[in-house]
Image (cartoon, coloured by chain):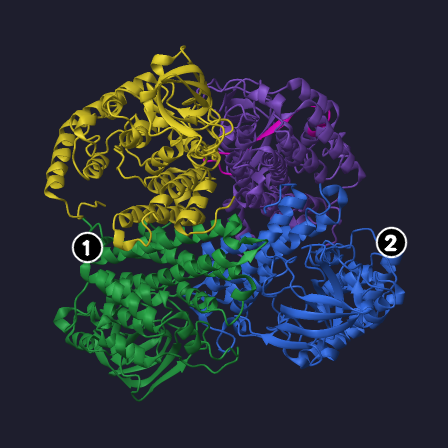
Chain colours: A yellow, B blue, C green, D purple
Amino acid sequence: MTEAGRKDTPEQAEFRAHCQKWLAENHPGRPPVHIPQGALELSDPAALEWLQAWQKAAYDAGLVGCDYSKDCGGGGMTDCQAIANQAMQQAKTPYFPNIIGLGMAAPTVYFHGQDGVKQKLLRKLLSGEEIWCQGFSEPGAGSDLANQQTFAEKRGDTWVINGHKVWTSLAHFASWMILLCRTSKDDKYNGLSYFVVPIKTALGKGVTVRPLIKMTGETGFNEVIFEDLVVEDKYRLDEVGAGWKVAMTTLAHERGAGVLVTPSAGGMVTGEQGRASVSSAQGLIDLAQQSPRHGKRAADDPAIRDAIIQLMIRQEGFRQNQRRAGVAALTDHPMRIPLQFKLVATEMNQDIAQLAYEIEGAASSLYVNDPAAPLGGQYPLAYMNSFGVTIAAGANEVQRNILGERVLGLPKSR
Amino acid sequence: MTEAGRKDTPEQAEFRAHCQKWLAENHPGRPPVHIPQGALELSDPAALEWLQAWQKAAYDAGLVGCDYSKDCGGGGMTDCQAIANQAMQQAKTPYFPNIIGLGMAAPTVYFHGQDGVKQKLLRKLLSGEEIWCQGFSEPGAGSDLANQQTFAEKRGDTWVINGHKVWTSLAHFASWMILLCRTSKDDKYNGLSYFVVPIKTALGKGVTVRPLIKMTGETGFNEVIFEDLVVEDKYRLDEVGAGWKVAMTTLAHERGAGVLVTPSAGGMVTGEQGRASVSSAQGLIDLAQQSPRHGKRAADDPAIRDAIIQLMIRQEGFRQNQRRAGVAALTDHPMRIPLQFKLVATEMNQDIAQLAYEIEGAASSLYVNDPAAPLGGQYPLAYMNSFGVTIAAGANEVQRNILGERVLGLPKSR
Amino acid sequence: MARSGNFGFGDDEMMLRDSARKFFADHCSADKVHALVAHDANIHRDIGSNWDKALWQQITGLGWTAICVPESAGGVGMPVVAAVAIAEEAGKAAFPSPLIATFNATFVLRECGTDAATRALANIASGSSATLAMTNAKGSWEASDTDVRFGNEKLNGTAWYVQDAQKADSIIVSAVSADGIGLYLVDPTARGVEIIPDGIIDLTRDQAHISFKDVDAMELAPPGAGDEAIRRAMPAILCMVSADMVGAGEWLLQTTVEYARTRVQFDRPLGFFQAVKHPLVNVMLEVDRAKSLTYSAACAIDEDPGQALREARMAKSAASDMAVFSASRAVQFHGGIGFTWECFVHIYFKRQMHNHVLYGDGKYQRTKLADLIVGEAA
Amino acid sequence: MARSGNFGFGDDEMMLRDSARKFFADHCSADKVHALVAHDANIHRDIGSNWDKALWQQITGLGWTAICVPESAGGVGMPVVAAVAIAEEAGKAAFPSPLIATFNATFVLRECGTDAATRALANIASGSSATLAMTNAKGSWEASDTDVRFGNEKLNGTAWYVQDAQKADSIIVSAVSADGIGLYLVDPTARGVEIIPDGIIDLTRDQAHISFKDVDAMELAPPGAGDEAIRRAMPAILCMVSADMVGAGEWLLQTTVEYARTRVQFDRPLGFFQAVKHPLVNVMLEVDRAKSLTYSAACAIDEDPGQALREARMAKSAASDMAVFSASRAVQFHGGIGFTWECFVHIYFKRQMHNHVLYGDGKYQRTKLADLIVGEAA
């Protein structure tokens, strides 16, 4: 269903028309290479290249970064990114490969970066020519983000960085990283600072990127080791010791609760053609209709039907929450719904993929390397990958704390 | 299914035969008055009287307190109470009214009471002639039991007690109370002491009992106010300051994890004749077969069938856990299963009663005062009362802490 | 089909919502409701109907019951979301009244398309209340199931599970004859009408079965048209009950959160413990889901009717499950206090449990949805 | 019917259980299994079967696969709980072997009552392994469903979802002919037999579909008797898979508890947080429930056969749901580490997910149970 009914400003109406027209004429069509379920799973350079070309084209057409200022390579418009996103979703385009750049790095650099640096970095970020990654997690700092051990030491007017980051998706393709690290051991929170650091150009010169293998057998995220990496002071974001504050900007945008709407494309079916994605409950109906579960059609099994409908209701509820979040007068607390998005979406996707096992029955034992696997084994793969998301970016246990504390006003649990 | 296959000692075999013979000849038959679902709901003196007569008869026949020493009015036998309990369950007898006395007071007084006092009090406790209640909970001390404010002050060789107890079931019938209170304000845990105090004989002389009304509209538990109640020192259990240790004996037995098996009868159907009790999943099948849920027979509704079977599995699992708990070599940790009983049983009963609403459909709106209510409205009543048990005796949240800490060895959560 | 981003909550609807919120805060606080409906705890109490008729008359005076009456019948002709806004506030206040019953009657009357129905709507617009008598002894919510027969211009039989029957000024009866289901308007005081109140758990409403013996009745929808009118009104009816549960769920959430902030155990406020905090967050998630689905369904009734039933059943399913969960966690986390009659929580607990089965619980809605969405099972 | 309080776990069964526990601790630690089955992470790796055949031969040498073979066939003739005890320890060790397959084959052979079946049992008693080929392309677990046909003394067709087919010394094939379902013994190396390995997620076993082209076969159960033999063996088969999940569930629980005790976040061990502690307690509750139900069902097979199927389906339902839950919480609470290939958790995660659907997941079992207990729905 479209939200188009929401009143557009003249600028927005004109822009909406532009997006729809351009997409009608410039949809990239079906990919020549296999495109994984999400950008974080990208490992084939050919797939990346094709997606980068798509992001660049959309950028050149003004559909990416519309709400960023022109001097930073943006469109200099107001509240137009959401319109571009809608148009791209409706046009079922591919997703953008520079997902961490657009969703986390861009707003952070935009609001906290030093002049000159912003202008230098954001254009190629928005165009997708330069891929970004995020250096937050460490072996000892998972959900406890403030427990950073990577250390940046000031030497003259440069910083020397040593440390060890893990679970850094896309680092093997990245030109830049947003880095949270420690500049003082005296204070847990105020001892943190925030930098952007070069990766690709510094490989072998203070930066080592090693792939980590996921439980699925896929690569896609990495560990990054810094040994005396030298970074100019201009790449520091905000004040020394303000790293935690800056990180909050990053996380707010990651949780869909930021000031700027993240440029996001998508809707195009990857993998199996012409069917709903593995993260849609509708997809389970298609699956159930073709799955001979334990000998009987799964779509005829009442227990399966009830379970699918429960997920469809959760999914529709999520969609309608997004709609309501856009109407201030219909939400008691401005962050109440936005802060639910990550938690609700990731658990819903996990449950959708898990139900697929019971729908597929015995065939759920088959993996992507088996020609007979239902839908190429995408569901078990999606189920395992779903834990990457319920764990990452503040495990969902932490998300519930955040909601209980910030929205409900309950006391901190530590 | 019977556990009779477990090898009996000669003493046990002979005793089992005695119990079965006596019960065959002395079953009290159907009650002349309405008997509530559980002893804690007792409010009609006539019902109490009838149940007391039954307990007295069973006591005189040696079926109550078999494992207690003879000088305390017990049977002086070993591991025989479980056999009497089995026999009574199989004979579908009424329950015993002195439930707190048998389950909590008796073992506590037995292990911690002073000589003379034990001998004086336990006989009439076991026979049911004197009803007991428990004085643990206070307005400020619910799950946080150690936060007792009721104070006992030593004056000469007597104690003067002031304070306020709540949720004291059966206090309106009780002759005695087991009382946990504070004798020193210096230490939260070591400042506690434990007494048995008179109630009935002290009414108006330092003790006031006021009924509290439950959400169901029933009475059955009370608040008890102490104003300068004078108690002889011989009624103190164990040392001054040892109250917490003594309370642990009480709670261990309440949780079915104590040294002595609690004398317990039951199995007789109260309320509707000839049907399984509202705390049995089997009862839901009977209910579903006679409930025209939203126009269709509930027993034909696959969603209802699945929900009922889930509960039957939980119930059978509970029964088989009890069976396994009796075999040391089949349990890694001696307390692992016993400490689960209260948590699992109370949540299961709550879920059973809750499912009844969906089985009954529109008729679930009818209460005990409506002649057309299914089974006299027993299920909604049982559902509401079920919260009394998931909350009481250490809310189930606390039960999970206990299991996580004592059995799994996880760190304390406070 | 295009939908309003704001679910159709325009300025008028927002104003109405705000004034309802203020009205209930001023006149229907939880302690007032408790004093009104819970003065007699006796489990074997006489069956009655406790409500404040004067307060109800103020509300009809404010025209709230006219909002969804078409302008052609002298009403305001606002969209269903307007009624949802009021129903939500009424649920938050556990307001005892024939409000929901009258809204539901309104939605059915709107689908009858007869002059008699228009006159009945006009009466509602001018402050009279009404309720639906459309359920049989088996508690079926199917529009085609009724135990009342129409013949020789008379009604005979019994209607069951009639909501707030003792408060309603008129009754809309679904009755079957050779030509199918028709709808009829009955005056509760008419000869042959006997209202037998049920003993129900919910303290904030009444319910009855009504026996009809040779009762004169005015036809609202002719035989064969009545069940269709009920079917077309069903999405709105489901939205009303869902909105009531959403409001009550929010009250239970906020009240329990407040208690968890202040009640100290183990030298910590209860809310410190994730065993309390996280379930409360889950209650919030379920309340928000049910709320958004209810708004969307109500919006669809006016903007995308083809989707309305499907969305309304989703809303009722989510709201029913939320109702049970919010009620059970509220009692659990209030501890012993929440288990007492004096505590306000049980009033909402009982209203939620009543509403969650009304017009079908979550499982019932999902079975219907599976047939709608997945298709009939082979 | 009277049942042993100890589920029939006598001294012999206890000794066997303890020696199995020690054996796996000594020879099959998690790191050894990881090195054995997880050396190639590549998602598009070749399909193979990783196991330590020498270790398997030690086990057959110890006579474990003979315990449930009747003495008349040269076995030990122990009750099913003895096999449950070993299967539980094998699951705890995620042991890659044809152990469960061979036990399952044993239970079917015991029900055939032919000399050929007795000879096949004797081979198992003397150390040879076997597996069941009884599932059709639709993955049906019904004894009456097979895609293999028997005619002119030959087998033709394909059997699907055959467990550990690449490890088994012989295959017991369910095939249909004009006279019904019969069971046949097939040598995997015989002419016309093609074992096509499946690419499966579980790293600790193999699975294959097997095509038969004019294959000579020895009759184990005559046409019309085969499906009944499978049906009678089903309780024991369900117990084997359940016991495997119970053992793996206990490993996941203990391993995650250990991690939660040591891993520090927010200056606290993870286990301090009730958001971790309470779900782990719930895992324990589910493991214990599944374990007791499995013991009870296995005991019933020998002591109260009329109850065996019902209890075995209860056990499989509880164990299947527990398997999913224990696996998902283990990965979640291990955080990023648990999501990596190097961590041992995913080996058990995948084994649990495989077992939970094998012979029917929880929903499937409960549907069957409803028909058994509530009666067929109208």
**Residue A51: percent from left, percent from top:** 27, 23
Residue A134 position in % (x across, y down): 38, 26
Residue C145 percent across, percent down from the top left: 34, 69
Cα separation, mark 1 vs mark 2, equals 78 Å
- Residue found at x 53% / y 53%: D370
Magenta residues, start to end: D121-142
Q: Is residue D284 magenta?
A: no
Q: Amino acid at mark 2?
A: Thr
State the image quarter where residue B315 is shown.
bottom right
In the rendered image of this protein, does residue B396 appear above or below residue B380? Answer: above
The residue wearing badge 1 is C303
Q: Secondary structure at mark 1?
A: helix
Q: Which one is nearer the viewer's eye here, D360 or C47?
A: C47
View extreme (front): residue: A156
Q: Position of residue D152 (x, y in %)?
A: 53, 27
Which residue in the protein does label 2 denote?
A: B9
Quarter of image, res D218:
top right
How would you rate the neighbour count of disc 1 (Cα within 10 Å): few for under 14, some for 14-19, many for 20 or more? some
